[in-house]
Image (cartoon, rainbow, N blue to C red):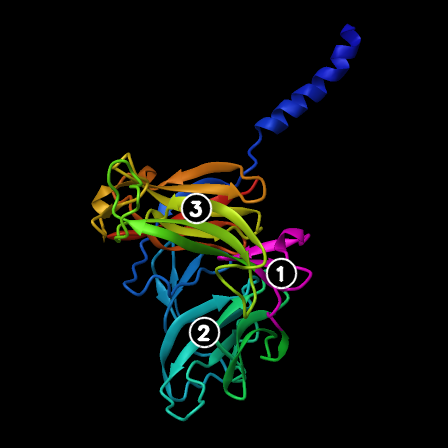
Amino acid sequence: MKKIFSYVLPFLLIAFLMGCAPRFPMVESYYVTPAKWDRIPDLFALSPDGEYATYPDVGFIQLTTGEESRPHADYKNLNFEGYMGSDGLEAWSPDGRYFTVSTLYDDRTPGANRDPLYIFDNRERTAKKLPDTARLGVWWSPFNTEHFMAQYFYNNEYAGLGIFDTQGSLISLVNEEVDFRNETELRGNGNDLWSKALDRPVASMQTFVSKSFLPTNPPFPTPPVERSGLVIGSIYIDSFAYPMDYEKPKYRFPIMEDTPLNGNVGFIFDPTGKYVLLAQWQCADANFTHCTNDSVMNISNVTDTVFTLLDWRTGEKQEIFRLSKIGDGYVAGSAPVAWSADGSTIIIGRHNSQSVVLKIKYP
């Protein structure tokens, strides 16, 4: 019996250690970036390696130093004739080779492309304008196929969402909803899940507001008082295509249901597509998980911003960080919330202070 136990003991220890091993990505280190920008937070892109952020007009900011640069200024064939500026819809390909920017042109001609796309090849150091069939924003495939999604125009009229190559040639339309839960390999890109087999987004996280009212005691009055203040709703992963019924998609997976939404700073997929990152306020009012004061945002009531990872298939959760760990008192998180394509970096904005950068380690 002792001999049998001596053989079994090592396997029991291995099983125990495996059970104790972290199953979620962890925050290895963090810092407050000296980079400052007073531009619209949504007009933001994080480089694939998590070292740079962008801002409109094709400028880069190094997060560790705050230094600004314009590395594309001397690229060949760069010609922004009639250029009025960037609308901020900028994006890197996941391998960092390509960088795209959606621009603004004051062209009053009927049917004119006022939002042309430019693509920069960082290997060849060239730039070019894409055909007018692809317009207004780029979402790169996270599978390094050099394909991206953009708005598709046919005969100068909007015709849906298309998948394009780096020459701007249309590959396919994103016009059919599929059951993303049956896809064997998915990856995340912001709010979207991409399928490897289809090389296109097949799902997107959406919020759905069910009711809003000013809270009283008890928290949810009966009948509800339909006034702005507390917003009750749900976060879903919905199948994605164009056109589609966004209130009733063919396939839907709940992340959070019938919950206050006021305190949600942001929610995105991690690059592997396995986890959802939730950034949420905690508030001094213990009776509510929201921060409002008679329909006016009251960040003085925010006591912390908590980062939670959710395995959306299993429902397992784990808290990974709180802004209070920084220790400078600026605990009200804000946009942007982004995760670098290589998985190494998360960045989150803060009200009245610089953004926080989290360096991530996967198990």
Amino acid identity at mark 3: Leu
The label shown at residue 143 is 1
- Tell me which corner region of the image, top left, top right, bottom left or bottom right, holds residue 320: top left
Provide the residue designation for mark 2.
101
Up-down relation of residue 296 to residue 169 (above or below): above
- The x, y position of residue 239, in whole percent, is 57, 59
- Tell me which corner region of the image, top left, top right, bottom left or bottom right, holds residue 69: bottom left
Q: Which quarter of the image is occupied by the C terminus?
A: top right
Image label count: 3
Amino acid identity at mark 1: Phe
- Which comes before the other along the chain, label 1 or label 2? 2
Q: Secondary structure at mark 1?
A: loop
The label shown at residue 278 is 3
Q: CA distance from mark 2 to mark 3?
A: 28 Å
Q: Which quarter of the image is occupied by the N terminus?
A: top right
Q: CA distance from mark 1 to mark 2?
A: 20 Å
Q: CA distance from mark 1 to mark 3?
A: 24 Å
Tell me the residue at 77%/15% (across/down). Answer: 7
Residue 184 on the magenta segment: yes
Mark 1 crowdedness (10 Å alpha carbons): few <14, some 14-19, many ≥20: some
Magenta range is 173-202
- Outermost residue to the front: 223
On the question of residue 243 being in view, the answer is: yes
Amino acid identity at mark 2: Val
On the question of residue 348 being in view, the answer is: no
Q: Nearer the viewer, residue 290 or 268?
A: 290
Up-down relation of residue 332 to residue 249 (above or below): above
- The x, y position of residue 298, in whole percent, is 22, 48
